[in-house]
Image: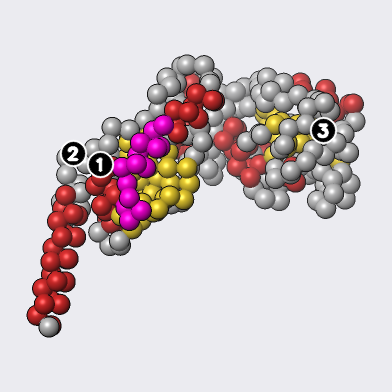
């Protein structure tokens, strides 16, 4: 009996190793025809039976074509269904089917990866994990560093950042702050305890998100990498409680004197408009009476 059990285990192990070899999961790494499979995934599948993955699919739309969301949704759904029809429940457990993005998220086995390695709709299969963005990569990626060499650094430009505020003491940001405002209400008032505040320290950042966004724009490169427009000036508006707010805060309206400050700095930068009471979508994010439907 032990002989049969041992033989069965050896056969199962041999089959699994053969599958991994077919995927290129060997000491030499992925085979040449497995370029869709990220090396990290190859390593992970050599150590565990299934891995959380993101399956990226081909996008039909040209980057220069006009945005057509219904067409994107339909195109993504068609490709997603073709890929899912290739897999069985033992190959892949779906955790997220995106709408307008041609991608799928879930847990996949080595057998599932093997089935999709040559699928015409699949661009890549990668581990679904934490990622970290860095300006020292993104600035060159969009050729902003080349613009800097040509003298285009944002000098003379004012950028309004409507977010959680700004770290007023950060060495990469402190010299760029032109003015500050705060528009909050409810359980999260401004630092002065009121729903509206302005002046030095009024937009002090409590969460770090607004500082991160401001750094992308105008970081001086002292501590963190240089921003896209390092010589631009920032006009931070702290409205942290509106980032996850299900209904508009129409009770908080900035004084008329604030509107000129807001839009002189932000009308070309953000595209946000004054409140439109007749427009009531299901989800809004507002900041001092300024609203954006489904803002990100």
Query: Which residue is at 41% across, 31% downward?
Result: 78
Work out whether mark 3 precedes mark 1 in sequence or the reverse, and give the earlier one: 1
Label 3 sits on residue: 289
**In the image, which is nearer the foreground, mark 1 or mark 2?**
1
Relative to 118, 78 lies left or right: right
Q: Secondary structure at mark 2?
A: loop
Residue 200 seen anywhere in this rendered image of the structure = no
| Category of crowding for the residue at label 1, using alpha-carbon neighbours closer than 10 angstroms: few (below 14), some (14–19), many (at least 20) | some
Work out whether mark 1 precedes mark 2 in sequence or the reverse, and give the earlier one: 2
Q: Are marks 1 and 2 in contact (CB under 8 Å)?
A: yes
Measured in 3D between alpha carbons, the distance from the residue under mark 3 to the one under mark 2, in whole angstroms, is 55 Å
Asked if residue 176 lies in the magenta stretch, the reply is no
Measured in 3D between alpha carbons, the distance from the residue under mark 1 to the one under mark 2, in whole angstroms, is 8 Å
Label 1 sits on residue: 117
From the top left corner, tell me how far across and down residue 273 is, in percent.
76, 24
In the image, which disc is placed on residue 33? 2
Relative to 16, 64 lies left or right: right
Name the quarter where the C terminus is drawn.
top right
Task: Name, please, the residue furthest toward the bottom.
Answer: 1
**In the image, which is nearer the foreground, mark 3 or mark 2?**
2
């Amino acid at each position: 009996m032990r002989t049969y059990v041992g033989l069965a285990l050896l056969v199962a192990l041999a089959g699994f190793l053969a599958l991994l070899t077919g995927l290129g999961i060997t000491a030499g790494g992925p085979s040449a025809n497995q370029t869709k499979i990220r090396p990290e995934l190859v390593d992970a599948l050599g150590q565990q039976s299934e891995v959380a993955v993101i399956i990226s699919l081909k996008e039909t739309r040209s980057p220069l074509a006009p945005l057509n969301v219904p067409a994107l949704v339909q195109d993504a759904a068609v490709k997603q269904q073709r890929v899912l029809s290739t897999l069985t429940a033992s190959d892949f457990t779906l955790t997220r089917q995106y709408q307008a993005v041609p991608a799928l998220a879930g847990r996949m086995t080595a057998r599932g990866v093997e089935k999709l390695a040559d699928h015409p709709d699949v661009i890549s299969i990668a581990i679904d994990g934490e990622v970290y963005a860095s300006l020292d990569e993104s600035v060159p990626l969009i050729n902003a560093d080349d613009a800097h060499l040509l003298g285009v650094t944002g000098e003379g430009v004012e950028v309004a950042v409507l977010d959680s505020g700004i770290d007023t003491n950060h060495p990469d940001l402190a010299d760029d702050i032109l003015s500050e405002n705060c528009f909050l209400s409810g359980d999260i008032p401004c630092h002065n305890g009121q729903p509206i505040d302005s002046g030095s320290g009024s937009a002090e950042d409590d969460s770090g998100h607004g500082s991160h966004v401001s750094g992308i724009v105008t970081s001086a490169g002292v501590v963190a990498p240089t921003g896209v427009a390092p010589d631009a000036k920032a006009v931070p508006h702290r409205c942290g409680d509106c980032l996850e707010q299900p209904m508009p805060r129409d009770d908080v309206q900035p004084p008329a004197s604030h509107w000129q400050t807001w839009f002189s700095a932000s009308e070309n930068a953000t595209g946000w408009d004054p409140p439109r009471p007749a427009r009531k979508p299901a989800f809004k994010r507002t900041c001092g009476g300024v609203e954006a439907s489904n803002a990100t």
